Image (cartoon, grey):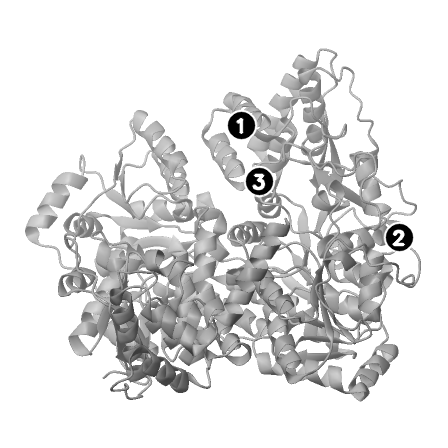
Amino acid sequence: MSAAAEPLAPANPTSARAALAQRLRAVAAVLLDTSPTPVTAPERDAATMLAEIARALIDDPRNERIWLALSGIAGAFPTRDEVDRVRRRIELADPDEVAVVLLEQGMASVGESGSPLAHVAVATGRVLVDVDFTARHDLHTGIQRVVRQTVPLWHAVHDILPVAWTAGRGAMRRLDEIEARRIHDWSADRRTDGGLDDPDRITELDDQIVIPWRCVIVMPEVPQMDIAPRIAAIGACSNNRLVAVGHDAIPLLSADTVDLEEPRKFMTYLTALKFADRIAGVSRSSTAEFAAYGSMLSSQGLPGPATVAVPLPVEFAAADDSAGPPSPAADDPNAADETTTEDPTRPEVVVVGSHDARKNHLAVLHAAEVLWQEGVRFRLSFIGSGGSNQEFLRRLRLLQHRGRAVRLRTGLSDAQLRRAVADARFTVFPSLHEGYGLPVAESIALGTPVITTFYGSTAEIAEEGGAITVDPRDDASLTAAMRQLLTTDTEIDRLRAEIERRRERSWQDYADELWDALVRPVLRDAPGSGDVEGHPAAG
Amino acid sequence: MKGTRLLAELNLRRTDARNTVPALVRDIDRHGAHRRRALQDRMGVLLAALAVPRPAAGGTRALVDAVITALHPLDPAKAWLMLGVLGGRLPVADDVVNVVRLARTDGPVAAIRPAIWSGPTPRVLDAGPFRPVEVISGAVLVDVDHTAKVDFATGIQRVTRESVRRWAGSHEVVFVGWHEDRPALRRLTPAEARRACWGGPAVADPDPGPILIPIDCRYLLPELATEPVRTGALLSLAQHSSNRLAVIGYDMCPITVPETCGPAMPAAFARNLAAVRYADAVATISEAAAVEYRGWAAMLPQIGIPGPLVTACVLPNEGAEVSEGALAAGADRLLVGGLPMVLVVGSHEPRKNHLAILHAAELLWRRGLAFSLTFIGGNSWSSDEFVHRLQALQLRGRPIESISAADDDLLFAGYRLARFTVFPSFNEGFGLPVVESIACGTPVITSDFGSMREITADGGALLVDPRDDHALAAAMHTLLTDDAELERLAKQARGRPVRTWDDYADQVWQILNPEGVGQ
């Protein structure tokens, strides 16, 4: 009895009472055996619905029903505390007070995070995909790439409903046209396109709420702090099943390498994640991290999520660009910043990524300086922006002052970046902690050997060939690897040959495996669900 | 723009030119006699720590030459020591790694400079005061910085006090704290050490004493360190220096139940864990806490860190004596109208789940059961809803009381006078109120998982799912009405095998200090 096809347009869209009546009717359709006949006056309709819902909850006050009722009344999902509070108040209240209890809690929530004019549609037995951040922002780092590749592929064969969250951060809603394009029709070279770069824009769909009932909710992103508590309540109190893509646990394990607010954001994420049924890690390493986290939960009487590894494909890096191989080099717009007199025909070593401490760029600068002092001739380029690592910049300037052939290149287009990586003799990525390690995959996808970390996800990417692994905490290890690749051609040739021989999984492979590992096992248990022949239009 | 660039160029040229021994000697000698003498003294201390004789003559130049020779080749442990002694502060990991690199590529003087040069105008900014630096070798250090500064004891402080006073009684230990104005260790004064062991009034203006730099020591941390400056320094100490870190592990609440923790806790705790990654040993206060710590530790190989050995050392369950007078005073204070008293001990933070108790109690009162409900514990983060609900019930005439400050006499009198206690927490590292109740022969209702299940294995408890209000109410109903069941549990409680603080302190010492350093 999916309400997805129900018309959402109310009789009088500007009336809060009419909206309330609509919302109550929508949840009553689920909670009651038979819905009362509608009456014209919306306030009487609302009152009748509310009384019926109150009775239904008195009869059966299970958390999932309270969760649904509160979602409908407020047009915003409740928190765990709110569900507990209402359940207890219902138990203690006189039967004819229950409707008031519900209304009071609902109205408090509306004020906080709902909208009085919201209309709801209850989605029953669907697969929802929460793409809130990716749909509302133009950012295109690792997590967003995964979403923009996977969701369209899923959409082509499965019946999924991508959702974002309302401006009040209280409930889920469908994507509007612009957001749907960000998900389904992303083009990497697109920066701004009539309003795409305005994440604070409030869509006209903002008060068209979707309430899931017996759904599977997929979390491919890391939900933001302001919605995590409501997702936790969905996992703990509702009858929906949560499944997630597990990216990394960096703020938990390597708090010394991240900004101060990152651990708090991540722990807030964990309040929701601990109620997930399943987590699919993007590497065996990140999966092991989440499995270990899951094992901690028995001490609070929770089973914890099942974990399964579904590694990202190396095709990752190159696939989301427009046409084929990188175009021939144009004039380097950063040439004016050159402070070196080094011969441009010398081999170039490229480092891609931001300068956060955990990327460990100071180690690369050190190894390079050792090699320059030994007389090895090469150029070193750091490509990336973001991260304000003053120590790194100071050291870079010092080496430039000594006449070393090292430079910082920022603001490159993706085509320029790919050109630089493809032309490099090798790239270096000795990160201390990664969930995946996009630059490693990028380098290999462009045919360039890479030096990377011997543990974690980057080691997994390296397994298939084309990479040398080092201990990122051991300067001698990194220096030796760079020395070898700079001074002997045989090793470079060997690695390039390995890259040729790699057989990569595709994004299609990843999308299929992810669905089978993450969604299908949970769908099996959910009644009235599954794939649907034919698929509705995007959004 | 061009002027800034020129200035940067000049600075860089000056930096490279500074990396000679004569330049360093000049910079030490030419900014005041006080500073020169202090740095010479520190270089002497450093040489002694490296077991190198101090040159008899030759002034600063001879000292610098000797230091450079003694430090070569520079490894992380020597770099850590050099930064600590010359800089008068415990370094952070980045500092240590940085000077090791500088020694390799920019020369020994470049490596030493970060320890000595603290600003562009040393005469003004680096003129002192230069506290004396003392190196301490091969000792057992016990860091009780926080515990020495407080009187009232939380669970963690209680465990710390009971442990460290016994360690001090049977082993050679050095109590340390931290300087107020810099990330550096200091010996606690005898008065401070006494307060760390026994509690009591504040120690007025203790003399901070010298900077203490340890080598080859066993560094024991029985309390929870959360200040970023302290945990950053401990991380480098554990990772780079010749000292070995061992800690008592209480719980992982900021990770496992972050929804019940205040907003500042996750970041502080994560930084604490970053240091514990490089510890040798963690002694957790229960098996359940060990499960949590081991889960975390199992993640560390994914980032190439072996992690500490996690061993459970369960807290004791010995009771506390209550005098007849205290018992009488307690009865006066706590009992009302001949009603059986149900006692709840613990703060009102969300994790303790006191709202469930209020609800279960109200269900029972409505069914006509007669009992009073007493809470002993303070308000805390996010306890507003509890306070609000409590007051609403009191207004309706329910016999509830909430006492926020109770001394041990009142607390333990309460345990003995109660018919039973209730502790339906969502997650605990241990659950002191549970064993305290059982130790007093008073049955307890607590949660059926984790540490609470574990520490009631010898009986004296009814276990319930704390998320189920009706299960909790049913258990309370049973203990209110079923005298036989109550007596059965009380008998189990009285007959439990007793584990004392002496046992605990000894066992946890063995776990944290297995090689017997300093004995």
Residue at 28%, 78% in the rendered image: B45
Q: For this view, does A168 lie left or right of residue B255?
A: right
Disc 1 target residue: A105
* Mark number displayed over residue A62: 3
Tell me, yes or no, whether dots 2 and 3 are on the same chain: yes
Q: Nearer the viewer, residue B182 or B470?
A: B182
Secondary structure type for disc 2? helix
Number of numbered labels in the structure image: 3
**Which quadrant of the figure has residue A317?**
bottom right
The mark lying in front, picked from 3 and 1, is: 1
Residue A412 in view: yes
Q: Quadrant of the C terminus of chain A?
A: top right
Q: Quadrant of the N terminus of chain A?
A: top right
Of callouts 3 and 1, the N-terminal one? 3
Disc 2 target residue: A157
Up-down: is B246 above or below B361?
A: below
Give the percent coordinates (x, y) of residue B112: 42, 74
**Which quadrant of the figure has residue A417?**
bottom right
Give the percent coordinates (x, y) of residue A215: 72, 45
Q: Output the chain of dot 3.
A: A
Task: Tell whether label 2 touches label 1 (CB within 8 Å).
Answer: no
Secondary structure type for disc 1? helix
Give the percent coordinates (x, y) of residue B462: 36, 56
- Binning the other alpha carbons within 10 Å of mark 1 as few (below 14), some (14 to 19) or many (20 upward) gives some
Q: Nearer the viewer, residue B168 or B49?
A: B49
How many angstroms separate mark 3 from mark 1 (CA)? 17 Å
At label 1, which amino acid type do we have? Gln
Q: For this view, does A97 lie left or right of residue A311?
A: left
**Which quadrant of the figure has residue B153?**
bottom left
Give the percent coordinates (x, y) of residue A260: 50, 53
How many angstroms separate mark 1 from mark 2 (CA)? 41 Å
At label 3, which amino acid type do we have? Arg
